Image (cartoon, rainbow, N blue to C red):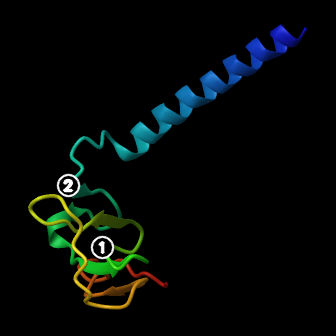
């Protein structure tokens, strides 16, 4: 009896996972090009304004907030080492990271 329930549960989970994948592809398209924002005001990410968020250890991260989606990546030098500029206090963000999008962000 337990084996039958386990098989039925796995079949149901597998079916739902396949439906979710198909639905998200149909709604959002194939997101192969990760440099393009496909949100409400779609544009190439180079058109958005970046700011800098300083993590708790004092190192910099590029940050972009376009109202619905947000982007964050570590700021590194040409050797791949973290940049810790000391531009601001830890756990703060500086710069125009909410600029470049016409979609408002209430936060």
Of the numbered discs 2 and 1, the one sitting upstream in the chain is: 2
Picture residue at 68% right of the left edge, 17% below the top = 11
* Quarter occupied by residue 64: bottom left
Is the N terminus in the top left, top right, bottom left or bottom right quadrant? top right
Give neighbour class at mark 1: few <14, some 14-19, many 20+ (Cα, 10 Å): many
Q: Is residue 92 left or right of residue 73?
A: right
Q: Secondary structure at mark 2?
A: loop
Most foreground residue, 8 or 55 = 55
Q: Residues within 10 Å of mark 2 (few under 14, many from 20)?
A: few
Q: Picture quarter containing residue 58?
A: bottom left
Q: Position of residue 59 (x, y in %)?
A: 31, 75
Please name the residue that numbered disc 2 is placed on. Answer: 35
Question: Which residue is tagged 1?
Answer: 64
Number of residue marks: 2
The answer to whether residue 78 of the structure is visible from this angle is yes
Residue 59, placed above or below residue 90: above
Whether residue 102 appears in this view of the structure is no
Relative to the observer, which residue lies in front, 40 or 18? Answer: 18
- The image shows residue 88 at horizontal and vertical percentages of 31, 91
Q: Residue at x 25, y 77 (%)?
A: 84
- Asked if labels 1 and 2 touch by Cβ distance under 8 angstroms, the answer is no
- Above or below residue 73? Residue 55 is below
Q: Quadrant of residue 13?
A: top right
In the image, taking residue 26 as reference, residue 4 lies left or right, namely right
Residue 4's place in the image compared with 11, above or below, is: above
| Residue 85: percent from left, percent from top | 22, 83
| Residue, far bottom | 88
């Amino acid at each position: 009896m337990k084996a039958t329930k386990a098989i039925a549960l796995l079949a149901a989970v597998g079916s739902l996972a396949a439906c979710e994948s198909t639905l998200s592809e149909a709604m959002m398209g194939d997101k192969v090009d990760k440099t393009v924002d496909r949100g409400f005001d779609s544009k190439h990410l180079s058109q958005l304004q970046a700011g800098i968020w300083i993590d708790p250890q004092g190192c910099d991260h590029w940050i972009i907030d376009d109202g619905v989606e947000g982007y964050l990546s570590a700021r590194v030098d040409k050797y791949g080492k973290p940049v810790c500029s000391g531009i601001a206090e830890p756990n703060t963000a500086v710069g125009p990271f909410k600029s470049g999008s016409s979609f408002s962000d209430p936060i």
